[in-house]
Image (tube, rainbow, N blue to C red):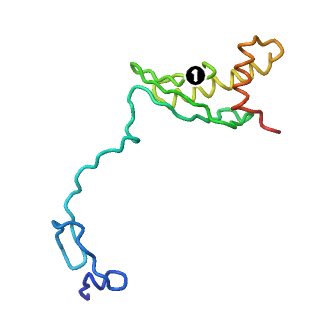
């Protein structure tokens, strides 16, 4: 077997510079860098353990399509997670955020069809909820 140098192993024979002064050359082709210092997590990636807001567009019923996502507040409190849409005052809950969001999706589907079926008899408050809900959800064309 022929011995290979770093220059032979790199594209166009260019040398590989050491990344850090503490880099050790283990063989002619392999090098070992010291462990990198831990990185600080950026502020945008840090999660608030109590509450967060997100865009929600889960479709749990094939008869409907989501045309505009809902803004949902997800809150964790004593082992129960609640997903809440403030603009129509509806929520779902579960033991984790996935269950809470899925429950919210089922609640929104139920609400959509119950309001749609009784649209002629809605109070002004429920008509307002229907109009807001209709901005986000429509029936799929068959």
Say if 17 sits above or below 1 in the image. Answer: above
Q: How many marks?
A: 1
Where's residue 43, x and y in %? 37, 41
Residue at the bottom extreme of this rendering: 2
Circle 1 residues within 10 Å: few <14, some 14–19, many ≥20: few
Q: Quadrant of residue 64?
A: top right
Residue designated by label 1: 86
Residue at (35%, 44%) from the top-left corner?
A: 42
Is 62 in front, or is 137?
Answer: 137
Where's residue 11, x and y in %? 37, 81
Where's residue 110, x and y in %? 69, 22
Where's residue 53, x and y in %? 50, 31
Say if 76 sits above or below 2 in the image. Answer: above
Q: Which image quarter is the N terminus in?
A: bottom left
Q: Which image quarter is the C terminus in?
A: top right
| Label 1: which secondary element | loop
Say if 55 sits above or below 109 in the image. Answer: below
Looking at the image, residue 37 sits to the left or right of residue 135; the answer is left
Looking at the image, residue 20 sits to the left or right of residue 128; the answer is left
Looking at the image, residue 20 sits to the left or right of residue 54; the answer is left
Residue at (58%, 22%) from the top-left corner?
A: 86
Residue at (23%, 86%) from the top-left corner?
A: 3
Residue at (63%, 26%) from the top-left corner?
A: 106
Q: Quadrant of residue 29?
A: bottom left
Q: Quadrant of residue 65?
A: top right
Looking at the image, residue 105 sits to the left or right of residue 30; the answer is right
């Amino acid at each position: 077997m022929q011995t290979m140098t770093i220059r032979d192993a790199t594209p166009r024979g260019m040398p590989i510079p050491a990344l850090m002064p503490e880099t050790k050359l283990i063989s002619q082709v392999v090098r070992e860098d010291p462990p990198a210092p831990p990185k600080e997590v950026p502020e945008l990636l840090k999660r608030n353990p109590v509450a967060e807001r997100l865009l929600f567009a889960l479709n749990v019923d094939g008869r409907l399509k989501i045309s505009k996502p809902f803004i949902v507040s997800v809150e964790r409190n004593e082992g129960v997670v609640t997903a809440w849409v403030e603009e129509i005052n509806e929520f779902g809950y579960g033991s984790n955020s996935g269950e809470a969001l899925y429950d919210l999706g089922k609640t929104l589907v139920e609400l959509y069809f119950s309001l749609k079926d009784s649209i002629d008899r809605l109070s002004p408050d429920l008509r307002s909820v229907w109009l807001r809900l209709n901005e986000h959800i429509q029936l799929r064309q068959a």
